[in-house]
Structure formats: C-alpha cells, structure tokens
C-alpha cells in the first residue's frame, strides 16, 4: 500500500473512531448535565450503549481455528520460528490449525497484536518437508499489513452496516397480522405492522449508506489490486529460502485444489496418515525435492523433523480427517 493510501486510510479510520467517541462522550455529557431527568438518562444511556457496541474490537482467530500448545508441538513451533527468522519476519507466538481450510494465515490478534500462524491441515498433510517450508514462506509473504486502527474501523463500519441495512421483514410479524385479521375481522388494524416494518427498513438503509460507502472506500484503500501480478510477494528467491519455481508450483496447487479430491478419496478408503503422505506429494506436479534451487539445505525442516511434526499433529489429523469430505 502506498504512502498516500495509508494516510487516506488512517484519516478515514480516525473519522470512524471519532464518531464512536462522540456518541459515548455525548451520552455521558447528557446524563451528567441533566441527571435529574429520566429522559436524559434514557437518551444518554442509549448513546453510550450504541458507542459501546460500535467500539472497535481487536482481531480474533476464527471459531474453527484451534491453538496448538507449544509443549505438545515443539518441532512445529521450531520450523515456524526458523522460517520466520529466515525471512526477517517476527516469529509467531502461537500456532493454530484449521481442519477444513487449505490456506494459511499469519495474523496479529488481540489488543497485544500477538502474531499467530494459522495452518490449513488438508494441504499441510499432503506436502513433503521442503514444500512445507515453501508453504510457510508463502504464508508469511502474504501477511496482512493493516494496523489496529484500520482493522478496528472496518469492524465498526461492518457493525453499522449489518445493524442498519440487513433488516428484513419478520415472518412472525406477518403471521401475527394474519392471525389478528382472521380473529378480529374488520376491527383488525389496517396495515400498521407492514408500515412500521417498511419504515424501519427504509430508515435503516438511509442511515446505513454513509457507513457502507466509508467501508467500501476503506476496503479499497487497504486491499491489494486484483490480477495475476497482484499477489503480495517479496523478491524471489525469498531471502534465499525458496525459488520462483517453488512458489509458482505451490500457487498452482493451492489455486487449482487438485489435491482435494484424491485426499478425500484416500480418507474414504481408510488410508492412514503415513499412506497419504507417501502417495500424495508424488502426484502433484513435476517439481521434486531435487529440483529445489534455494539456499535451504534442509536445515529449516528435514524429512525426519517433518515426520516428528506429523506425530505431534496426530490427534489433530485424526479429528480433521473425519471431516475432510466437507472440503469444497
């Protein structure tokens, strides 16, 4: 992201956070200056509650991500640290796995912005030791460069949009109106329920459009441009860790997802982790271990250490393989 876009994103984020603070401060001021009136407490409390709901939250891991304890997977943490240091990236403080996602992430979560590496188990399972290093390199290279202020503003704008523009007619309200018309006949209210619902939806869309436009603008400033050359990549080879050919091979594997169907078939046949690992890497592409021209001599991850990682993740594999049929 260019300096101009960073400044523009920062300004938009400050506007969003400033509006949230104005709501909270206004609510407190109304209550403080008119504490003898019940209406002031109601209005001020409402503004403070809205501001509290919109107050930015730090990024968190998805519900399907499971943290792996460092004590139970020292070799996994070791290779994550070694590859990060080889690339000049801050090593992750925690490693998590996801059962049904083939992509990985390197994200900062929580108020402390703790770096966390997230690994998709399906693709990790089928890769050899060298290709696992390439996968980690690709994940670190694709890391997001957004900061807490920008990500918090996006979170706040998303809450505004969802709250104001996602309203739909309530089926229960329509059923109640039909029931009243059936029971009360001519004495039933004429269109009151539909009018109230329509008015609420129109008002929500009118108030939600500014938030939607600001969210689109902020996303446009922070998103990488689309296109075949837009993928965030450092100059290859990546600090001598991987090569262009290895990156291209893994990109093709991930984008084409050709390994998913053979992996699902192997699981349905009852293949073990060792059997899958022995057969899957040889099927995908012609880039063998000997074709690697990077400066890595196996010190980042040897085949023996890769086998140790499989043993460390055995419990996660056993659980994940039961759900591999859901990958799409």
Image (cartoon, rainbow, N blue to C red):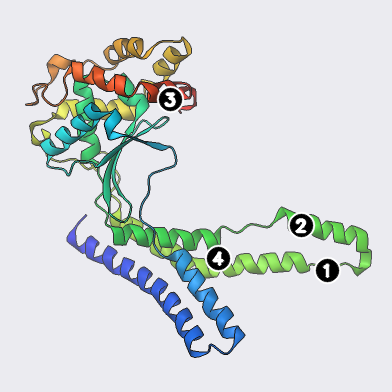
Q: Which residue is mark 1?
A: 190
> Which of the 4 image quadrants contains residue 41?
bottom right
User: In the figure, 110 relative to 266: above or below?
Assistant: below
| Circle 3: element type | helix
Residue name at image x 12 percent, y 38 percent: 85
- Nearer to us of marks 4 and 3 is 3
The answer to whether residue 81 is seen in the rendering is: yes
2 or 4: mark nearer the eye: 2
Viewer can see residue 287: no
Q: Tell me what residue is drawn at x 43 percent, y 25 percent.
A: 320
Q: Residue 11: which numbered mark, if any?
A: none
Residue hosting label 4: 205
Q: CA distance from mark 2 to mark 1?
A: 13 Å
Alpha-carbon span between mark 4 and mark 1: 25 Å
Between 314 and 135, the one nearer to me in the picture: 314
x then y, percent, for residue 79: 19, 30
Task: Look at mark 2 in the image and give the residue it sits on.
Answer: 174
Marked residue nearer the N-terminal end (2 or 4): 2
Where does the image place residue 137, in percent across and percent down from the top left?
A: 19, 34
Q: Secondary structure at mark 2?
A: helix
* Residue 136 at x, y percent in the picture: 23, 32
Quadrant of the rendering where the N terminus is positioned: bottom left
| CA distance for labels 3 and 1 | 55 Å
* Rendered position, 85 above or below 129: below
Left-right relation of 201 to 262: right
The first of marks 2 and 1 along the sequence is: 2
Query: Residue beneath label 3, please?
Result: 320
Residue at mark 2 to residue at mark 4: CA–CA distance: 21 Å
């Amino acid at each position: 992201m260019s300096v101009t876009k960073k400044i523009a994103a920062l300004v938009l984020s400050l506007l969003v956070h400033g509006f949230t603070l104005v709501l909270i401060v206004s609510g407190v001021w109304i209550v403080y200056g008119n504490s003898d009136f019940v209406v002031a407490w109601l209005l001020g409390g409402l503004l403070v509650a809205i501001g509290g709901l919109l107050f930015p939250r730090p990024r968190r891991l998805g519900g399907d991500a499971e943290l792996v304890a460092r004590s139970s997977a020292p070799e996994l943490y070791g290779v994550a640290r070694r590859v990060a240091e080889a690339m000049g990236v801050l090593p992750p403080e925690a490693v998590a796995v996801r059962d049904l996602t083939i992509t990985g992430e390197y994200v900062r979560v929580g108020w402390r912005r703790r770096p966390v590496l997230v690994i998709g188990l399906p693709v990790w399972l089928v890769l050899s030791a060298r290709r696992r290093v390439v996968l980690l390199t690709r994940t670190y290279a694709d890391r997001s460069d957004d900061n807490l202020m920008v990500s918090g503003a996006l979170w706040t704008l998303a809450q505004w949009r969802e709250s104001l523009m996602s309203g739909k007619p309530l089926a229960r309200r329509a059923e109640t109106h039909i029931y009243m018309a059936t029971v009360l006949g001519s004495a039933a209210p004429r269109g009151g329920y539909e009018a109230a619902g329509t008015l609420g939806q129109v008002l929500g869309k009118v108030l939600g459009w500014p938030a939607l436009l600001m969210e689109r603008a902020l996303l446009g400033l922070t998103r990488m441009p689309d296109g075949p050359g837009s993928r965030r990549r450092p100059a290859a080879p990546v600090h001598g860790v991987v090569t262009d050919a290895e990156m291209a091979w893994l990109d093709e594997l991930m984008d084409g997802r050709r390994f998913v169907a053979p992996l699902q078939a192997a699981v349905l046949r009852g293949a073990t982790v060792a059997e899958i690992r022995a057969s899957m890497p040889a099927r995908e592409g012609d880039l063998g271990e000997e074709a690697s021209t990077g400066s890595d001599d196996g010190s980042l991850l040897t085949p023996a250490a890769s086998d140790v990682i499989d043993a460390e993740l055995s419990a996660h594999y056993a659980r994940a393989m039961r759900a591999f049929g859901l990958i799409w």
